[in-house]
Amino acid sequence: MVIEKIPYFLIGFFILIGASVGSLVCGWFCPTGWFQEMLYKIKTVKLRFSSKALNQLRFFNLVIVALLIPYLVKEPWFSKICFMGMLQGGIPLALSDPEIRMMIGSFFYAKIAITVSFLSLAVFIKRPFCRFFCPLGAIYSLFNRISLLQLEVSEGCIRCNRCQEVCPMDIKIYEDPASPQCIRCLACTSCTFVEMKFLGKGF
């Protein structure tokens, strides 16, 4: 049975968290982000890949894949193709249950291809899923400019780009301290010119 109701509690939760700390959830509590960072630590040639168009793709996923398509077909389509869902549920279930293996079709192999693609990209590019595809990150990022938690770069910043080197989202925080791409991991605050402020007070 499909229950067609607006999830007011969930929307309120997103607004409360977003208005308080912006994308901090992505930087501190997301297992998907952590897993990608572990893959990125594998010693290989690293690619610095930045694209404004790709940065906007996660908003497309939010509107089309996470909202519009589920509303039309009454199924959570983004959950169906999420690579972490495959790693945590789809693949283990298929390996452990013969009956499920009998039901495997072409769609399952398509999801395997998506999973392998993201795992491969994460070895060479910082957090590709978070930066270019995650609809939940897109929601929280909308609050970065108005949240109570903010980053501030002092005028003494010499733009040495050390912030970009430690940033899991590969951004230069001095260009836009309230960037929607920022996940508030606070790695850049190791620099003396970058400070975290909550309710206007520094820490």
Image: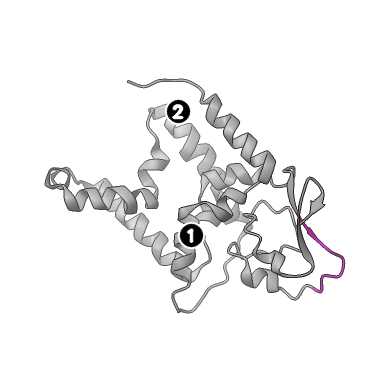
Q: Is residue 55 above or below residue 104?
A: below
Image quadrant holding the C terminus, namely bottom right
Q: Residue at x 36, y 55 (%)?
A: 114
User: Magenta-highlighted stretch: main secondary structure?
Assistant: loop
Contact check, label 1 and label 2, Cβ < 8 Å: no
Name the residue nearer the viewer: 48 or 93. 93
Residue stretch rendered in magenta on the structure: 151-158
Q: Is residue 154 above or below residue 44?
A: above
Q: Name the image colouring.
A: one colour
State the image coordinates of residue 102 (x, y, percent, origin top left). Answer: 13, 45
State the image coordinates of residue 75 (x, y, percent, origin top left). Answer: 37, 32
Q: Secondary structure at mark 1?
A: helix
Q: Give the residue type that dot 1 points to.
A: Trp
Instruction: Give the alpha-carbon distance from disc 1 to disc 2, as whole Å.
Output: 30 Å
**Which numbered tag is attached to residue 71?**
2
Circle 2 Cα neighbour tier, 10 Å, few/some/many (<14 / 14–19 / ≥20): some
